[in-house]
Image: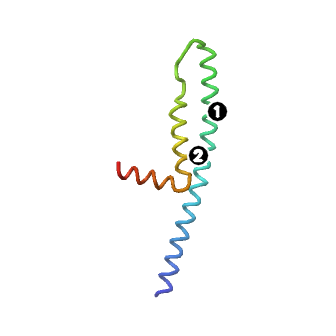
Amino acid sequence: MYNYKLVEQDDKVKKFHEERIMAFDALESRLEDIKKTLRQAKIETIKYYRENPSSYAVVKPTDLIGDFIKDIETLLKPEEWKKQISYLRNY
C-alpha cells in the first residue's frame, strides 16, 4: 500500500516536471512566430512610411510591444518574477 502511494506520487511529480519543461518548448515556438510577425510588421511600417512620407502615424505599437518584452525579460531574471507576483498580490 505504501509503495503504491510513493510510486503514484513520484509519477505525479515526474509528470508535473515534464509538463513544465514542455511549456518552454511551446513558449519558444510562440516566440519564433512572434519574430516572424515582427519582421512582417516592420516591412508593413516601411511600406506605409514610403507611401506616406509626411505621416506621423503609428503603424504598429512598437512602444507597447517593447514594454511587454521588457516585462518578459524581467520575469525571466532570477527572483524577479517572485517580486512581481508579490507586488500584484498587494496591489
Residue bearing mark 1: 39
Q: Are marks 2 and 1 in contact (CB under 8 Å)?
A: no
The tag on residue 30 is: 2
**Left or right, 71 with reference to 91:** right
| Quarter assignment of residue 15 | bottom right
Residue 80 drawn above or below residue 4: above
Residue 49 lies, in percent from the top left, at 60, 18
Q: Crowding near pointer 1: few (<14 within 10 Å), some, many (20+)? A: few
**Marks 2/1: CA–CA distance:** 14 Å
Give coordinates of residue 64: x percent, y percent: 50, 34
Q: Furthest residue to the bottom?
A: 1
Q: Is residue 39 above or below residue 11?
A: above
Near mark 2 (Cα within 10 A), the count class, few <14, some 14-19 or many ≥20, is: few
Frontmost residue, 60 versus 8:
60
Query: Mark 2 or mark 1, which has the lower sequence index?
Result: 2
Furthest residue toward left: 91
Secondary structure of the residue carrying tag 1 is helix
Picture quadrant where residue 35 is located: top right
User: Looking at the image, which residue is at 41% across and 54% down?
Assistant: 86
The amino acid type found where label 2 is placed reads Arg
Colouring method of the image: rainbow
- Residue 10 - label: none
